[in-house]
Image (tube, rainbow, N blue to C red):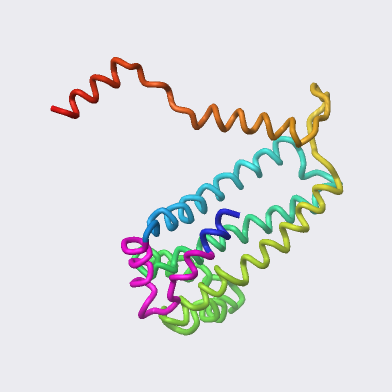
Amino acid sequence: AVQVVTGVFLWMQYAPSAQTAWESVYFIQYQTQGGWLLRGVHHFTAQAMVVLLVLHMLQVVIDGAYRAPREVNFWLGLVLMQIVLALSLTGYLLPWDQKGYWATAVATNLLGLVPMGLGEPLQKLVVGGPAYGHHTLTRFFALHAGVLPALLIFFLVLHVYMFRRHGITHKLPVKYQDGTFWPDQVLKDAVACLAVTVHRPVRRGALAGRLVRGLH
């Protein structure tokens, strides 16, 4: 949800063209009010999303939630992970800077190594021709802002549907009774978030010392 909201606002000022992409990102970062924050949230949340997906997969493996009859949902989860990684790859090129350019070149060159004579046609299809340029950027933008989000939503709906159908997988024996999400779990999550976000209170003496040093 954070990625969708921030992505839509970034889309309003982004110009997907080889001649204007870098300038539009510069404008968002340094001249748009709050643009640096908007872009930063979108960037770092994307990285956090990949980390959380890996942790989620480890949880599924540890709990054995990949076994029958939930193996289909496990496959759907793997597909969702590939889509998220593809979103990260396509979004990396959109600033049209040196880092994104060469990282995309490495990834697409790996695609060219597909055997049976399929690598070169696939690479040209993704790149948009024999060289990286305007068509590469527009194709990656179309994938990042259109095709991949639609696929993500489609497979996410299937994933949640299968999850609701089979229920939660947990280890036996069950030590705790079932509870409700609202308000029990929501209250626990709120308390946990509050404990993480609240900083240690500063003592009055230390605070006064800082103020005095600041005045000097």
| 208 left or right of 115 in image | left
**Residue at image coords 57%, 33%:** 193
Q: Quadrant of the C terminus?
A: top left
- The answer to whether 177 is drawn above or below residue 73 in the figure is above
Q: Which residue is located at x 44 percent, y 69 percent?
A: 94
Q: How far across and how far down the image is residue 152, in percent? A: 66, 62
> Which of these two is toward me, 202 or 58?
202
From what the image shows, is residue 18 above or below residue 69? Answer: below
Q: In the image, 77: left or right of 48?
A: right
Q: Is residue 180 left or right of residue 201?
A: right
- At 61% across and 41% down in the image, what residue appears? 55
Q: Is residue 128 magenta?
A: no
Q: Residue at x 54, y 65 (%)?
A: 8
Q: Quadrant of residue 121?
A: bottom right
Give whichever of 46, 123 is nearer the camera: 46
Q: Position of residue 171 (x, y in %)?
A: 79, 30
In the image, which residues are magenta? 8-32
Looking at the rendering, which quadrant does residue 15 occupy?
bottom left
* 210 to 205, vertically: above or below: below
Q: Nearer the viewer, residue 178 or 76?
A: 178
Count of residue discs: 0
Quadrant in which the N terminus is drawn: bottom right
Q: Quick one: which residue is furthest to the left in this view?
A: 216
The residue closer to the viewer here, 119 or 78, is 78
Place of residue 192 in the rendered image (x, y in percent of width and height, measured from the top left): 59, 29
Q: Position of residue 200 (x, y in %)?
A: 43, 23
Q: Magenta stretch containing residue 30, yes or no?
A: yes
